[in-house]
Image: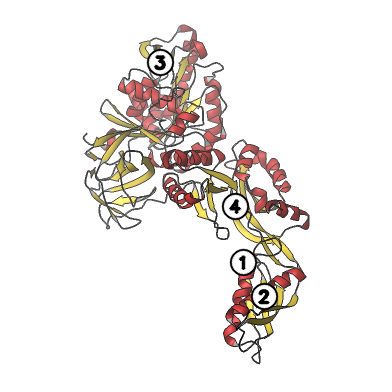
Amino acid sequence: MSPMPSDKIRNIAVVGQTGSGKTSLVEAMNHFVNKTSRMGRIEDGNTVSDFEPEEIKHRHSISLSVVSLDYQGYKINLLDSPGVVDFTGEVQAALYACDLALFVISATEALSHDTVRIWQSAQALNKPRMCFVNKVDKERADFTSTVERLSQAFGEGIAPIEIPLGEADKLSGVIDLFSETVATYVGSSASTTEIPPEIAISEHRAHELLIEGIVVADEEMTAAYLDGVVPDKVALEAVMANGIRDSTVFPVVVGSALKGIGIDRLVDFLVEIGPAPESSSSSEIRARTYKTYSDPFLGRLSLMKVLSGTISVDTDLINTRTGTSERLHSIFMLSGKEHLNQASASCGDIIAVAKLNSVRTGDVLTSSKSVATAEAELSFEVPMLRYQIVPEAKADEEKLSNALAKLNEEEPTISIARDGRTHNLILSGLGELQLSTILEKLTRRYQLKASLLPCEVEYLETIAKPIQVEGKYKKQSGGHGQFGVARLRFTPLERGSGVKFVDQIVGGAIPRQFIPAVEKGVIEACDHGGLHGYPVVDIEAHLYDGAFHSVDSSEMSFKMAGILALREAITQASTTVLEPIMHLAVTVPIRQQGDVLGDLSSRRAKVTRTELDDQNGAVTIMAIVPANEIQSYASELRSLTAGQGRFSATYDHHDPLPKALYSRLAKANGS
């Protein structure tokens, strides 16, 4: 397949809330362009873009998929993205790669915050946007109210260029407000007719409002219009195309994906007025990876967009992050799970390349080290929901770690880490559904069964008061025995001080070579834990006296003396349990501030400040809160705010755990 010129390429991210019909719309467009014998259905698990077993099982998109269409000399790359908030990283990747975000809006449902959130993300990236109002054939469909909600949510620029002819079971066509004609459908086939007389007046008023909304973007056209000169359709579409490209106009079209109504018009609109990729005059190659896949037959696949130059098979490129060279042995155009070989790809095209072992999501590849790149880092939401992940079989621990590392390459919104103290494997994600999907993939791809357990809270202990003790280790078992005495004063220190050891031995009470062994014993005993089993910190150990035997003393005996000294100090002075305190930043709509503050209060949080964002109608609440109180906060905040709240949490310090809560420790330890 020859490379498509940049001006003939359209990269479209299909986005919107779950249930709006994104995958069905992609299926309908594929059916229209490729004249397939029948459309796939989500219920039947045979759509072109939802092909992963987990997607078929759950009947919703999980991963970003690409469906490329050849249509009348154009190449349309449709990036079908999930609507479930747990998989927002896939949406973000689609927005980074696209040149137009097509929002699929249900005419039967309220506009969810998920749609608003995606719109704000596209706005932040300055991506052109348009809306397809879907499901106008369903009961309770209300196109007018849907457009009003869009205008209220997104402000100026929302511009309906089509309206439905009828709604619900009376939907029969689409009215073109540019030409003031009707596309009437029998099945998915359309014929052009005149506006019915009973709606001619209201339609013409909508036509005039559309023209008035467009001409204001062009001074000459505005002046002519005020003099009574009405621009023709071609001129209006040209001005609208500029407004779309500049992200000042957001056209709204309408139809039914399941019935094929308006699909032909949508495809034509995308190629005629949709923005082409940004062109580059440079012949030097630059390409960026936006997604990494694992294919059962081709192995690792990198989804790339060519930013400049033309890529050909067997091209050698430099990974600017690693400095390593990668050869492109094969280039593919994607159509769901199908991979169609291409010899080359021009600037602006989206392709897949197999087996680029050093390449990760976000990496930029260039034809030489001297090629300048100005691409900003790709930013994905930080995963905040943490669980221990435990293999069913103990022998599979290393295999599990390796498998998770491979899945992490595909999903940048999960993270895998080892707990520094417990050495447990920690899996973090954006939500419960995302993490449960990870477990399903582990079973299907790697034959690994694993479960998720709550993370252990990293409690610590410190001695409750200063204490002076003696650690004495004496053992006689024939021949040389063991003997060592270490006398120490233990003092509590400020939070975050760790464990300090001070040598105050004078007069040779303990030989110099044995003093490090005492320190080692104290530190080892601290790591082993205090009365509740948690590491002991924030103490200073003063070694001031001791005793030794010329024959029986050894490093081992003085190490044991240090261990026994700390154990005795803990027994006599008792310990205070320290709990980890997190710095929490929660962003929610202003109207939900009271509910969130009340919830934080129940979690023993102390609010430090709030920051208002009047432009977006949001407030960010800063607080410090015990880590144990926000173990599952990601899911709970989502439930409390209907998915509109977001937060970040970072470790701040440790504080004493209130005595009244010590009973929690017994439950956590199983005692």
Relative image position of residue 311 (x, y in whole percent): 24, 44
- Disc 1 and disc 2 in contact, CB within 8 angstroms: no
> Which callout, 1 or 2, points at the residue further toward the start of the chain?
1
- Label 4: which residue? 649
- Disc 4 and disc 3 in contact, CB within 8 angstroms: no
Q: What secondary structure is found at the residue carrying circle 3?
A: loop
Question: How far apart in space, not on screen, are marks 4 and 3 (Cα)?
Answer: 54 Å
> Which callout, 4 or 2, points at the residue further toward the start of the chain?
2
Relative image position of residue 534 (x, y in whole percent): 66, 61
Relative image position of residue 337 (x, y in whole percent): 35, 33
Q: What secondary structure is found at the residue carrying circle 1?
A: helix
Query: Is label 4 or label 2 in front?
Result: 2
Q: Amino acid at mark 1?
A: Asp
> In the rendered view, would you say 326 is above or below 644?
below
- Label 3: which residue? 180
**Residue 527, numbered label:** 1
Relative image position of residue 124 (x, y in whole percent): 47, 43
Question: How far apart in space, not on screen, are marks 4 and 2 (Cα)?
Answer: 31 Å
> Which callout, 1 or 3, points at the residue further toward the start of the chain?
3
Neighbourhood count class around disc 2 (C-alpha, 10 Å): few under 14, some 14–19, many 20 upward: some
- Label 2: which residue? 540
At 67% from the left and 49% from the top, the residue drawn is 629
Q: Amino acid at mark 2?
A: Glu
Question: How far apart in space, not on screen, are marks 1 and 3 (Cα)?
Answer: 79 Å
